[in-house]
Image (spheres, helix red, strand yellow):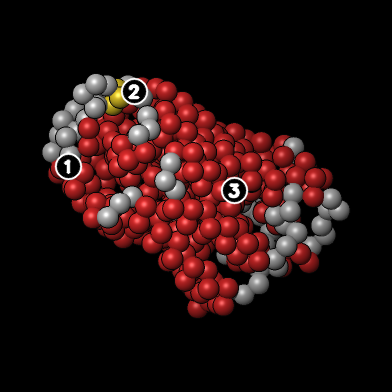
Amino acid sequence: MNNPAPDVSPKFSGYQKVVVGMLAFLQFAVILDFMLMSPLGALIMPALSITPAQFGSVVSAYAFAAGVSGLLTAGFADRFDRKKLLLFFYAGFIAGTLWCGLAKSFESLLLARIVTGLFGGVIGSVVLAIATDLFAPQMRGRVMGFIQTAFAASQVLGIPIGIYLSNHWNWHVPFLALAALGVLGGVLIASQMKPVAEHLKLRQEHGAFDHLLHTVTEPSYLLSFVSVLFLATGGFMLMPFSSAFTVSNLGISQHDLPIIYLVTGIATIFIGPIVGKAADAFGKLRVFFFGTAVMIVMVLIYTNLSTSTLIVVTAINVVLFVGIFSRMIPFQALMTQVPVPTQRGSFNAINASISQLAGGLASLVAGHIVAQGADGKLHHYDVAGYVVVATSLLACVLLWRIQRGITPPAR
């Protein structure tokens, strides 16, 4: 069916605004932890004397651990107060981030990323479940838009500061600083967020395994799970090696990297809320198609680029993230309309698990596609870009099918 005409968008209450802020902070911490691996890759690889394939393993270790964790927790995701579940996994995530900051070898960093993934990989799914519980469908585009400004904050504040700290001290310091900041955020959430337990009043299935099995095998969810698989490929294929590619192939100085992330982040602070409003106003599927088209064009340009200037590379990154945000936000908002209330936690956990497992596989594959030559440059990065283009087109087809099957859910 065609996109239905959107309803008049309701206003946010004061508490809802506070909740959006807290959820955005959680996303900021989790996204920054993952994003830091990319710009610090150019420092971590020589510091620990590891190859691109080993670095790909470090990145994918987080993803695989998060994927396994999502599957293990999916059966229990709707059986507890979502706030308590969130704080439990957030505490483990902070501990894992601290370990990353203390790692002195490839093996230690690998184990630290596994622990961080086991806990951090579930946080995003709990955040989505809370957002779905507390906000009407007509508000969720804006909610996702604001929550995704956490990505922009990581670009504007986290990554440039992280690179600055690593350039002036070492690559361990950004992770230690993030762990310290995370503790403060956890205290704020524990004291200010109200319990999120309305779903517990509804009839629950007796066994956790039955709950997981019924969610996994629900026919109306299967296309959503497959679409997440294809959507996850993009970030994990290109992002882990983007800083090394920018420095080694495009000729941008390591000290100029923060400028690229800073400018891109400032731009995306405005992009997120605009895309969220557009998704609610014009239809989530249309905005997703627009974002995919923009992203494909920019991926092809970026991955085939040779030595360039700071201005050109920064401009390409800004437009690329316009495309990425214009896919990510409407996709997440659309996914909130798929599950019934008693399966929101398990549905999101399974989605997150599939995303992380697919991303982990993509990182491993990218680590073997991309090779470092004797001149220090990365080769075959364009091949990874072509894979991203193919999976993006498949995601469009699947999301179109999903949109056709969605009926407005009951609150």
Circle 3: residue type? Leu
For residue 399, which quarter of the picture?
Answer: top right
Q: Is residue 230 in view?
A: no
Circle 2: residue type? Ala
Q: Secondary structure at mark 2?
A: strand
Crowd band around label 2 with a 10 angstrom C-alpha radius: few (<14), some (14–19), many (20+): some
The foreground one among 277 and 361 is: 361
The foreground one among 207 and 175 is: 175
Compared to residue 109, the image places residue 389 above or below, namely above
Q: On residue 371, which mark appears?
A: 2
Instruction: Of the two numbered discs 3 and 2 on the same chain, state the one appearing first in sequence.
Output: 3
Q: Position of residue 176 (x, y in %)?
A: 41, 59
Compared to residue 397, the image places residue 66 above or below, namely below
Q: Position of residue 132 (x, y in %)?
A: 60, 59
Residue at coordinates 63% horizontally, 66% vertically from top-left? 83
Q: Is residue 235 in view?
A: yes
Q: Position of residue 80 (x, y in %)?
A: 73, 62
Residue at coordinates 53% horizontally, 43% vertically from top-left? 111
Mark-to-mark CA distance, 3 and 2: 29 Å
| Residue that extends furthest to the right in the rendered view of this protein | 206
Mark-to-mark CA distance, 3 and 1: 34 Å
Q: Are marks 3 and 1 in contact (CB under 8 Å)?
A: no
| Residue that extends furthest to the front in the rendered view of this protein | 104
Q: Are marks 1 and 2 in contact (CB under 8 Å)?
A: no
For residue 411, which quarter of the picture?
Answer: bottom right
Compared to residue 27, the image places residue 391 above or below, namely above
Residue at coordinates 13% horizontally, 38% vertically from top-left? 309
Q: On residue 118, which mark appears?
A: 3
Q: On residue 253, which mark appears?
A: 1
Q: Is residue 178 left or right of residue 204?
A: left
Mark-to-mark CA distance, 1 and 2: 20 Å
